[in-house]
Amino acid sequence: MTKNVLITHFIFIILIILLLGGCSAVEGLQSTPTPTAIPTPAATPTPLPDKAILIIPDGTEAALANEASQMLSQLAVSSNLVFESRTSIDQKEITPEVKIIVFLNHPNNLGTMANASPGTQFAVKRPGLEPG
């Protein structure tokens, strides 16, 4: 074989070794895929519905209680409020969802309740004021 053919074969073999060496994985340099955490949507609590509460104390005339209940119920529904009727209410029961409280008599602690619940409106039926 001639010297030129030997050099050509030698260069050819070197190139093949380099090509094959470049295709093989080198330990320590191989990157491994890192698992990525898939974000899960955070559960948001369903907000409680806003409320309108009518306080009908014991001993209230049935006609007045019924008329006030019907009137406030209709107003609450048209304002997207949940209507409740109770005989009394404690300060701790006035949550941010309570938007209005209507009393058929004047409670002794109205000022305290109003100061402690600035997001709630309070209404009191005046004595001698009859619906209709």
Image (cartoon, rainbow, N blue to C red):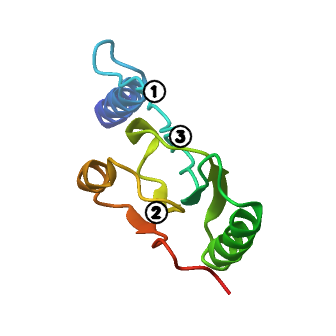
Q: Which mark is residue 99?
A: 2
Number of the label disc, if any, that sits on residue 43: 3
| Viewer-nearest residue: 102 or 130 | 130
Residue 127, given in percent of the width and then of the height, sits at: 47, 71
Q: Which residue is mark 1?
A: 35
Cα separation between marks 2 and 3: 26 Å
Give the label, 1 or 3, closer to the camera: 3
Nearest to the observer: residue 128 or residue 78: 128
Amino acid type shown at disc 2: Lys
Q: Is residue 22 above or below residue 74?
A: above
Which callout, 1 or 3, points at the residue further toward the start of the chain?
Answer: 1
* Kind of residue at badge 1: Pro
| Residue drawn at 66 percent across, 80 percent down | 78
Q: Is residue 7 left or right of residue 94?
A: left
Query: Of helix, strand and loop, which one carries label 3?
Result: loop
Crowd class of label 1 (few under 14; some 14 to 19; many from 20; radius 10 Å): few
The reply to whether dot 1 and dot 3 touch (C-beta < 8 Å) is no
Q: Which of labels 2 and 3 is toward the front?
A: 2
